[in-house]
Image (cartoon, rainbow, N blue to C red):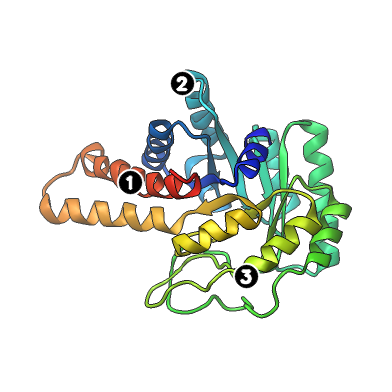
Amino acid sequence: MEIVKEAESKKTAIGHFNISNIEGLWGIFNAARALNLPIIIGLSEGERDFIGVKQAVSLVKSLRQEFNYPIFINADHTYSFERVKEAVDAGYDAVIFDGAKLPIEENIKITKECVLYAKSKNPNILVEGEMGYIGTSSKLLEKIPEGVSLEHLTTPEEAARFVKETGVDFFSPSVGNIHGMLKNAPNPKLNIERIREIRQAAGVPLVLHGGSGISDDNFKEAIKAGVSTIHINTEIRVAYRDAVKNFLDKNPDEIAPYKIMKGTVGAIQKVVSERLKLFNNI
């Protein structure tokens, strides 16, 4: 929480980057360490299942301990109390309950249950709640995800009520952001004034999901308006895919995984480094 408060006071943002494997972890960590910036590693339910719920915690915390470095692990988009409990029990530093598709009453009810359980097990764990559906998949898109409305964004009144009744540490609103990146057009612009209003009403740090595809200027405006943590995933996946494809195109007979995947670490590091510099005015 302290690193987020410090970022907010400096009008910067903490970078939150998702991993699906150890190449992603090294790419992100190398970028952060080179810039001497704190970092959050996120894993969705699918990513946690692939790496291993507990194994991911061990990987991230091993870097924290070996290098004495501010690297933290977050259980990204979690859709049930049971899976929040699983992440809390596994030792995650933070967890998100994503009830954005639920009616507000049900979203508040389950989020509150998650907060109470998490804090009872670890008073230092951070819990995030989300309101306003922005899609679910970090992928390349032909169009705005089905069910996402760019007209009906989270309101300051909803944000204030949600935070007050749930007790979350962080709040993630719908402010024009979407998960994924549009293939043939820029992603929608964020509603900067709404971000400013929600931050004031909510009274807790704001998290921006769906950061991939947002313009640099829009990011800067959002940070100034009150966003203090930004999630990036799709851009990392694209860099990973392209690095593997380029290597195999040039080396079709190579079969050693560590040789094939070596280039993905550098590709991910490049993407993460560029985003961290932007988020921190470097």
Residue hosting label 1: 270
- Residue that badge 3 annotates: 191
Residue type, mark 3 in image: Asn
- Expressed as whole percent of the image width and height from the top left, the position of residue 122 reads 76, 31
Tell me the amino acid under the disc marked 1. Answer: Lys
Asked whether residue 81 is in view, the answer is yes
How many neighbours does mark 1 have within 10 angstroms: few (below 14), some (14-19), or many (20 or more)? some
Q: Is residue 20 visible?
A: no
Q: CA distance from mark 2 to mark 1?
A: 21 Å
| Label 2 sits on residue | 67
Q: Position of residue 270 (x, y in %)?
A: 33, 46
Please, what secondary structure does the residue beneath circle 3 have?
Answer: loop
The quadrant in which residue 162 appears is bottom right
Q: Nearer the viewer, residue 253 or 33?
A: 33
Tell whether 21 sits left or right of 86: left
Residue located at (68% from left, 39% from top): 5
The amino acid sitting under disc 2 is Phe
Circles 2, 3 touching at the beta carbon (< 8 Å): no
Among numbered discs 2 and 1, the one appearing first in the sequence:
2
The disc, 1 or 3, on the residue closer to the chain's N-terminal end is: 3
Callout 1: SS: helix
Mark 2–mark 3 Cα distance, whole angstroms, equals 39 Å
Looking at the picture, does residue 254 appear above or below residue 189?
Answer: above
Crowd class of label 3 (few under 14; some 14 to 19; many from 20; radius 10 Å)? some
Write the residue at 41% across / 34% down: 35
Percent coordinates x, y for residue 16 in the rendering: 53, 46
- Give the foreground label among 2 and 3: 3
> Where's the N terminus, which quadrant?
top right
Front-most of residues 162 and 46? 162
Q: Is residue 211 left or right of residue 154?
A: left
